[in-house]
Amino acid sequence: MTTTEKIEQIRKQLKDKLCILGHYYQRDEVLKHADFVGDSLELAKKAAAAMEAEKIVFCGVHFMAESADILSGAYQTVYMPDTNAGCPMADMAPKREVLLAWETISSLAKNFVPIVYVNSTAALKAFCGEHGGATCTSSNSAKIFSFFLKQNKKIFFLPDEHLGANTAHDLGLPDDEAAVFNPSLPNGGLGAEQIEKAQIVPWKGYCHVHAFSVDDIKRARADHPEAKIIVHPETPKEVLRLADAHGSTSRIVKYVEEAKNGSTIVIGTEINLVKRLAAAYAGRVAIYPLRPSMCRNMALTNEEKLLDVLENFPKENEIHVEPKLKTNAALALKCMLKIS
């Protein structure tokens, strides 16, 4: 019996007691076994709604599995096929440094609230929940930001500089009202007037998968002058503003679905998704990567590791967020789900 057949046999045996979640950036060999495929927001909702599942297997990276555990019930256990699948961007905002930054910002201006991208540790989500904030995804960041800005709150956004700056721009804020906090510099490299003027203070972190450049855009325009270019909002603002469109992973998928026959689209996001879309729409839409860019942490998960979890459900593959962090992080996640 092949690995594929063994996995499907176990799925049939466990039925609704098992729920396999797969992020868009996973390989096809893994996603074909997933009960649900989506971006961070979609999978967070599916994890919260999987009431009958006693075992939730998250094929993604560590912060996603933590979120599933935070939203899960006491009778449920979350597993990862490879617990080494982390997120470098999440690691760019250690809680100790964030606490120091929060003290600095709070001492220089009032009415700040922390908003944390779901691409973050449970500890950071808990900090956010403790201070009355919410998490967000690239799908709903504008909605979450608007909710708090309408309450005359200023936003300290963690840990992605680019999503913070791009969301501010989407909301019509001028660039000087999105002041980047660099933790390696005194006071984040910001003066009191800058912090007071800013509506959004993004943390200086980034996703290496979406670190596209202006040269990438120029090259794509030269190679495919007829193409529309769409990029993920984790892309640097100077690059994103040269593209024709931008949006979350789900928005990119929808953009391709809605494209006219004969269109050419260049996509700036993780290469596994770009390849999957290119294959799915071959003959109708020509799809090219802005530049091949892979998330190597996502790539750690494969069929063999998934099978090992399903056959043994090893303790070392369980994901557990400690109770205190879980309670406070749940406040931030549930706030997001309520607003969105």
Image: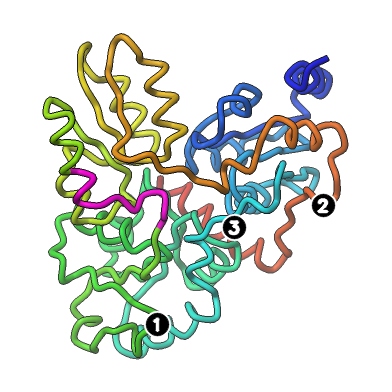
Q: Which residue is mark 2?
A: 316
Of tags 3 and 1, which is closer to the observer? 1
Residue 157 horizontal/vertical position (percent): 37, 66
Disc on the earlier residue, 1 or 2 = 1
Residue under the image location 48 percent in, 42 percent down? 41
Say how many tags the image has. Answer: 3
Could you tell me how far apart the alpha carbons at marks 3 and 2 are, in whole angstroms? 23 Å
Residue drawn 36% across the image and 49% down it: 210
Q: Is residue 215 magenta?
A: yes
Crowdedness of circle 1 by 10 Å Cα count: few (<14), some, many (20+)?
few
State if disc 2 and disc 1 touch (CB < 8 Å). Answer: no
Q: Is residue 129 left or right of residue 29?
A: left
Question: Which quarter shows the N terminus?
Answer: top right
In the displayed structure, would residue 294 be above or below residue 272?
Answer: below
Instruction: Check disc 1 and give the amino acid type.
Output: Ser
Boundaries of the magenta span: 207-217
| Disc with the residue nearer the chain's start (3 vs 1) | 1
Circle 1 is placed at which residue position?
Answer: 184
**Rendering quarter of residue 52:** top right
**Is the residue marked by circle 2 packed among few (<14), some (14-19), or many (20+) residues within 10 Å?**
few
Q: CA distance from mark 3 to mark 1?
A: 30 Å
Q: Amino acid at mark 2?
A: Glu
Secondary structure mainly formed by the magenta segment: helix
Secondary structure of the residue carrying tag 3 is helix
Residue identified by numbered label 3: 330
